[in-house]
């Protein structure tokens, strides 16, 4: 497998957030800690989606609460975590993909 194909097959981590929510900002910090702690910066292709900028994506992925994390592989949502409360919950959710 070449480096290019390995990059192309990385799962996408989609973080649905709201720029006006303190809870979303805290969860963004928790997510950064989880990825930094385990040195998994390159595990996912990270997308941050603000609900006010992309309501079409919020509807498409049926996001009902913010913040929400989705892991998308290929064209399929392989994991969903709505309104996480902390680092441990995020780490447990992402564990199947983290090294």
Image: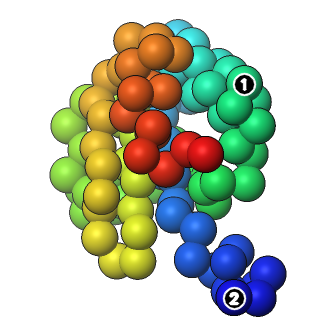
The answer, for residue 75, to whether it is visible in the render is yes
In the rendered image, which quarter is residue 99 located in? top right
Q: Is residue 25 visible?
A: no
- Residue ID at (76%, 88%): 2
Q: Position of residue 97 (x, y in %)?
A: 49, 50
Image-based side of 85 in relation to 19, left or right: left
5, 15: nearer the viewer: 5
- For the point 57% across and 77% down, which residue is it? 9
In the rendered image of this protein, does residue 18 appear above or below residue 14? Answer: above
Residue 59, picture quadrant: bottom left
Q: Give the number of the mark in front: 1 or 2.
A: 2
Question: Residue at horizontal 29%, vertical 43%?
Answer: 80
Q: Residues within 10 Å of mark 1 (few under 14, many from 20)?
A: few
Q: From the top left corner, tell me how far across and down residue 92 is, in percent.
A: 40, 27
**Which residue does the numbered mark 1 point to in the structure image?**
37
Numbered disc total: 2
Element type where label 1 sits in the image: helix
Rendered view: 65 above or below 86: below
Closer to the chain start, of discs 1 and 2, is 2
Q: Which residue corresponds to mark 2? A: 1
Disc 1/disc 2 C-alpha distance (Å): 27 Å
Horizontal side of 74 relative to 32 (left or right) equals: left
Q: In the rendered image of this protein, does residue 31 appear above or below residue 49?
A: above
Q: Secondary structure beneath disc 2? A: loop
């Amino acid at each position: 497998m070449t480096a290019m194909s390995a990059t192309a097959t990385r799962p996408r981590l989609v973080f649905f957030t709201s720029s006006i929510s303190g809870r979303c900002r805290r969860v963004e910090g928790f997510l950064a800690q989880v990825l930094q702690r385990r040195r998994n910066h390159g595990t996912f292709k990270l997308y941050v989606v603000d609900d006010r900028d992309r309501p079409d994506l919020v509807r498409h992925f049926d996001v009902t609460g913010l913040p929400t994390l989705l892991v998308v592989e290929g064209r399929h949502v392989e994991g969903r975590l709505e309104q996480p409360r902390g680092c441990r919950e995020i780490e447990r959710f992402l564990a199947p993909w983290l090294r």
